[in-house]
Image (cartoon, rainbow, N blue to C red):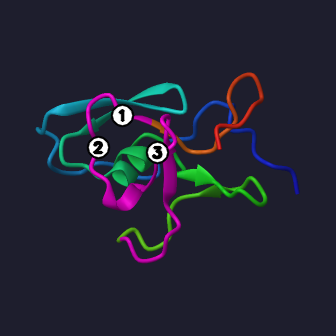
Amino acid sequence: MSKPDPRATPEPPLFRRLAETGRETVALVVDGRPVEALAGDSLLTALLANGARLRVNEFDGRPRAGFCLMGACQDCWVRLEDGRSLRACATPVAEGMRVLTGAAAPDGTTTR
């Protein structure tokens, strides 16, 4: 089985916002790509509202979208550019946040 190319054109978002669309926007950067979220969103919500995956599995490179979505399973760990690890489901978005999910960068290097 071939690994998906994380540099390919992004897939449609996994989550689609149906309500609460009037909140302030928050700008963050995910794997070098500008992303917008709404104030009060968890990082996991922001990631899945802007793409089809949370991160890639470190063992086989396949996409992961989180598992329990409520902080119990430990499947949503990502990192900030400063090296701090955090759980995307339990972390609120913050203006200017710079997140690394483990996807390959355009030069082929990985961020995780």
Q: Nearer the viewer, mark 2 or mark 3?
A: 2
Indicate yes or no whether the magenta region holds residue 92. yes
Mark before the other along the chain sequence, 3 or 1:
3
Which SS type dominates the magenta stretch?
loop
Residue bearing the label numbered 1: 97
In what element is the residue under mark 1? loop
Residue 24: give its label: none
**Residue drawn at (14%, 33%) of the image:** 24
Residue 13: give its label: 3
**Picture coordinates of residue 81 (x, y %)?**
50, 34
**Picture coordinates of residue 34 (x, y %)?**
43, 25
Left or right of residue 68: residue 61: right
**Picture coordinates of residue 33 (x, y %)?**
50, 26
Q: Nearer the viewer, residue 99 or 55?
A: 99
Question: In the image, which residues are magenta?
Answer: 71-98
In what element is the residue under mark 2? loop
Residue bearing the label numbered 2: 93
